[in-house]
Structures are given as structure tokens and as C-alpha cells.
Image (tube, rainbow, N blue to C red):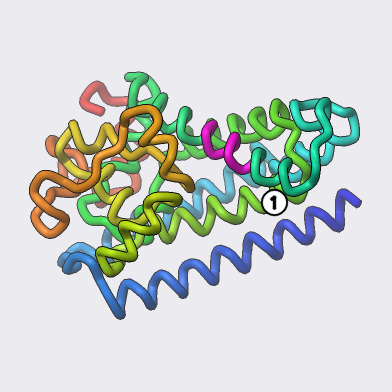
Amino acid sequence: MWSSLQELEAQVLLFTLVGGFVAVGLWETWRPRRPGSADTLRRWRASGLLWLLNSVLLRFLLPVSVVMVALWAEGRGWGLFNHFPVPGWVRLVASLLLFDLFAYGLHRALHASPLLWRFHWVHHTDPEYDMTTGLRFHPVEALATAAANGVAVLALGLSPWTALAAEAVLLADAFVAHGNVSLPPRLDAVLRRVVVTPDMHRVHHSDDLAESNSNYGSIFSCWDRFFGSYVEQPRLGHDAMGIGVADSDRRTNLSVLRLLAAPFRRRA
């Protein structure tokens, strides 16, 4: 059971990774929201190397996935939904909502805590905004987030299948939400009533501090509305808004070694 689930999880995540990269990449080429920059290849290299480093570290330092945690908890009856049996569809919907609420709270904590912000700062220093921004995380944040997600799965008692669904959706969301893609305004307005759209999340990457401290949601948009952190549109509009951290150094933004060292320097 363990080995078959691990194999299925690897296949689903690989399909999601490749499919998301290709689909959003084609979308960005077909209907880009903002023009690219001269530093595109250097940005992609920095984000790609960070993602590769994080993947290797997670494989060796945290080899147990959320699906394995869910299977282990289910076998012992641990977690909220393992204590209170509910119909399958109710459990699926409630699990995804609560797991996304946890992700929202964790994201707000990354901005609110000076210590956590030092590492999350790396994600926000990307001077442009496209699907590779969703791969740009400091290894300390990547490891801490993976561990926190495991704790959330354990506490909620997610089923292995729900954990796999959540993992795949969050991976796909990393590409879609950060996509430099254009949606018809009316369609965007309809979609963001339920889910986080690229335009909605792009506001979170504004170099305006008031705007970057908003729109923390990962999958569902309801949490930002409920907790008062929702911003409809950037003050300058999407075409004119600045992306990144206003006082960050461009040499650091495009260098993997500088990004790895930045959280340990006072300036970060």
C-alpha cells in the first residue's frame, strides 16, 4: 500500500509539474498580461536553480510526503476527520477548505513575523512576475512549509486521497496563480469570487507594501475577503504597478548565491 501510493503520488506530481509548466508557459506566450524584461533568462535560471536545490533537500531531509503522513494518521485514527466520520464528499470539501485556510494563515505569518519574512522575502524579490516566480523560494522556507503542511495533514486527519489532491492542486496553483497571463475582466471577476486568479495574486507581489500585505490566499479567495486582507486592484493598475521589493538590490534578485545568503544578512 505504501509503495503503490508513493508511486502514484510521484506520477501525479510529475504530470502536474510538467503539465502546469507547459500549459501556463503556452498561455503566457499566447496572452501575456505584462511585457517581459531583458533579465528573463537570468530570472528563470535563479528560480529554476532554487527549485532544483529545494527538491533535492526535501527529498533527503524530509523524505515523508503529506500522503504518507495522511496514511500513517489514518491507520492510527489520528486527526479531526478520523475522529468524526462524515460522508466522503463532505470530508473532501471540508478538508480542502480547512487545509487552504491553514495555508492562508501560514502565508500571513510569513509576512507578519520578522524572522519568517527574512526567508519569504526571497520569493518577493523577483523583479518580474511569471510562472517561474512560483518556484522561487528559499530552502529554509521550503523545508519549513513542507513540515508545517505535514503537521496540518496530521491534525486535520486528511485522507491520503485528499492529501494527494491538495498537494497536486497547490502545485498547479504555483504556476497558474503566478502566471503572466491575461483573463477577460468579466471572467476574472466571476472566477475570483471562488478562487484566486492570477490578477488577484499579482497584487500581492506589488512593490507597494500596503498591496503586498494583501491577497494571501492560495486556492480559495474567501479567506482574504473574510479576514479583511482582500484588495481588488493595484492602485496604479496592473500595467504600471511595480513588482518585487522596492528597496531590494537587482544583483541580489538575480543571483542564487546572494538570494541564499540574503536572509542571514541584516538588510533582508
Q: Decide if residue 66 is on the left or right side of residue 254.
A: right
Question: Which of the 4 image quarters holds residue 209?
Answer: top left
Q: Is residue 47 visible?
A: no
Question: Which of the 4 image quarters holds residue 131?
Answer: bottom left
x, y percent for residue 115 = 37, 20
Q: Residue at x 16, y 46 (%)?
A: 234
Q: Decide if residue 1 is on the left or right side of residue 251.
A: right
Q: Decide if residue 79 is on the left or right side of residue 199.
A: right
x, y percent for residue 114 = 32, 19
Binning the other alpha carbons within 10 Å of mark 1 as few (below 14), some (14 to 19) or many (20 upward) gives many
Q: Is residue 99 magenta?
A: yes
Mark 1, secondary structure of its residue: helix
Q: Residue at x 77, y 42 (%)?
A: 159
Quadrant where the image shows the C terminus? top left
Q: Residue at x 34, y 48 (%)?
A: 256
Which residue has dot 1 on it?
164
Q: Is residue 94 visible?
A: yes
Residue closest to the eye, 161 or 242: 161
What is the magenta range? 96-102
